[in-house]
Image (cartoon, helix red, strand yellow):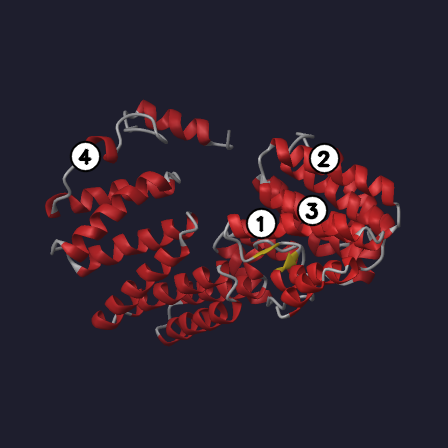
């Protein structure tokens, strides 16, 4: 249970303020309530509570319903109410990863902002578009939208709007800290921005910035073999993540150091961090545990410990299979394919790579964390060329 959650619910209960929590009790969907203009302001307050307590599915049900009425049934509400509703709709859609819908709603907000000549609405429209593009891996578009939002905020002297636009711009430069292991180089974040993060109490964002923005050079990671304190900013990020209870970021920070070490040939350091991370896990059968076994297998592969590598990869697959995580399993299969190629076992490598391709296709992914589609096609072409499958090789080579 989250720290403080018990006291929050107890206080609400004492004041007879709980209608429902999560999916308990009657919901909008079950009550089939008719949405009317007179109740819309009360509905917005209820919607705020749903979003605040992260009951996104229930919020989405209401938002879809009211948005349909506004667009197709001439449901009359003020532009300010439209903006509030669409703001929630875009926000919830991003959280639910319905990014096309979020982009559609952001366009509606932008049109409304242009009609009203409203600077606040324009800032939010470009801000949320930046976040959407970032999660779609369209990082140039994300940076451009953040830049527009920042310019509008500066023109209007809106300090908070400028801060949030600058923050999403920084996030975009680091792919939103989404499906990345580490940044290829340090990303510049000004001292003034660090002060603003502290001022507005954005401690979670600050922790991510400390972990991912700095300490990306291999020579700095090399010093960590003797003392973690040598990673000054990463250590700050881990301490801050510990304070706020973000255990996922702590795990990610160790994973970053493992990947930095292994990709720069510092395999003893990579193994050391792998062991430390595994020891810190409460659940030895979790997804993090499976990823650690896969990482150890990758490191052992680089050390040409072929048989031991296979054992660790198989252990990773076993854990991830029990957790029903096909995307993670595909990443392990990719590493197993690389190991087979290094051992000149091209038939087995081809089978593993085909499993990766099928996973990407069935899950409608753009890539895997460990590789993109072009790399998979290239490796498949290599395997088929080595196996003498000329037709398959020619077909794959055109990609």
For the residue pair 164 and 194, the one nearer the viewer reads as 164
Residue 55 at x, y percent in the picture: 37, 38
Q: Is residue 229 above or below residue 246?
A: below
Q: Residue 32 shows which numbered tag? A: 4
| Front: mark 2 or 3 | 3
Name which of mark 3 and mark 1 comes first in the sequence.
Answer: 3
Residue 42 at x, y percent in the picture: 19, 42
Q: What's the distance in space between the residues labelled 2 and 1, CA to CA?
A: 34 Å
Mark 3 Cα-neighbour bin, 10 Å: few <14, some 14–19, many ≥20: many
Q: Marks 3 and 1: CB-CB under 8 Å?
A: no
Q: Marks 4 and 1: CB-CB under 8 Å?
A: no
Q: Where does label 2 land, which residue?
A: 280
Name which of mark 2 and mark 3 comes first in the sequence.
Answer: 2
Q: Residue at x 69, y 45 (%)?
A: 332
Mark 4 Cα-neighbour bin, 10 Å: few <14, some 14–19, many ≥20: few
Q: Marks 2 and 3: CB-CB under 8 Å?
A: no
Q: Where does label 3 land, which residue?
A: 333
Name which of mark 2 and mark 1 comes first in the sequence.
Answer: 2
Name which of mark 2 and mark 4 comes first in the sequence.
Answer: 4
Left or right relative to 318: residue 110: left
| Front: mark 3 or 1 | 1
| Front: mark 3 or 4 | 3
Name which of mark 3 and mark 4 comes first in the sequence.
Answer: 4
Q: Where does label 1 land, which residue?
A: 358
Q: Residue at x 64, y 36 (%)?
A: 320
């Amino acid at each position: 249970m989250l720290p403080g959650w018990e006291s929050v619910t107890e206080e609400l209960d004492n004041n007879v303020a709980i209608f429902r929590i999560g999916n308990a009790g009657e919901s909008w969907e079950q009550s089939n309530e008719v949405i009317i203009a007179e109740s819309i302001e009360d509905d917005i307050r209820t919607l705020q509570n749903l979003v605040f307590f992260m009951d996104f599915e229930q919020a989405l049900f209401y938002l879809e319903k009211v948005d349909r009425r506004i667009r197709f049934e001439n449901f009359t509400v003020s532009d300010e109410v439209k903006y509030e509703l669409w703001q929630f709709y875009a926000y919830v859609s991003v959280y639910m990863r319905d990014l096309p819908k979020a982009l559609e709603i952001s366009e509606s907000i932008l049109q409304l902002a242009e009609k009203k000549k409203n600077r606040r609405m324009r800032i939010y429209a470009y801000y949320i578009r930046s976040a959407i593009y970032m999660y779609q891996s369209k990082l140039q578009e994300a940076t451009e939208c953040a830049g527009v939002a920042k310019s509008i905020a500066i023109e209007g002297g809106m300090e908070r709007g400028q801060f949030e636009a600058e923050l999403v711009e920084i996030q975009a430069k680091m792919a939103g800290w989404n499906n990345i292991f580490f940044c290829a180089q340090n990303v510049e974040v000004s001292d003034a921005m660090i002060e603003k993060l502290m001022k507005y109490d954005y401690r979670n964002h600050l922790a991510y910035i400390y972990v991912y923005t700095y300490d990306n050079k291999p020579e700095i990671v090399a010093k960590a073999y003797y003392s973690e304190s040598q990673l000054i900013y990463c250590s700050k990020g881990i301490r801050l993540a510990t304070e706020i209870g973000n255990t996922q970021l702590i795990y990610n920070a160790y994973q970053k150091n493992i990947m930095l070490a292994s990709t720069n040939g510092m395999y003893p350091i990579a193994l050391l961090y792998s062991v430390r991370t595994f020891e810190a896990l409460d659940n030895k059968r979790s997804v993090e545990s499976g990823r650690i076994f896969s990482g150890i297998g990758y490191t052992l592969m680089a050390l040409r410990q072929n048989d031991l590598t296979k054992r660790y990869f198989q252990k990773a697959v076993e854990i991830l299979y029990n957790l029903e995580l096909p995307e993670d399993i595909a990443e392990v299969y990719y590493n197993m394919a690389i190991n087979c190629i290094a051992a000149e076992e091209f038939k087995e490598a081809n089978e593993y790579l085909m499993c990766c391709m099928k996973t990407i296709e069935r899950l409608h992914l753009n890539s895997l964390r460990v590789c993109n589609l072009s790399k998979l096609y290239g490796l498949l072409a290599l395997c088929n060329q080595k196996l003498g499958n000329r037709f398959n090789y020619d077909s794959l080579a055109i990609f």
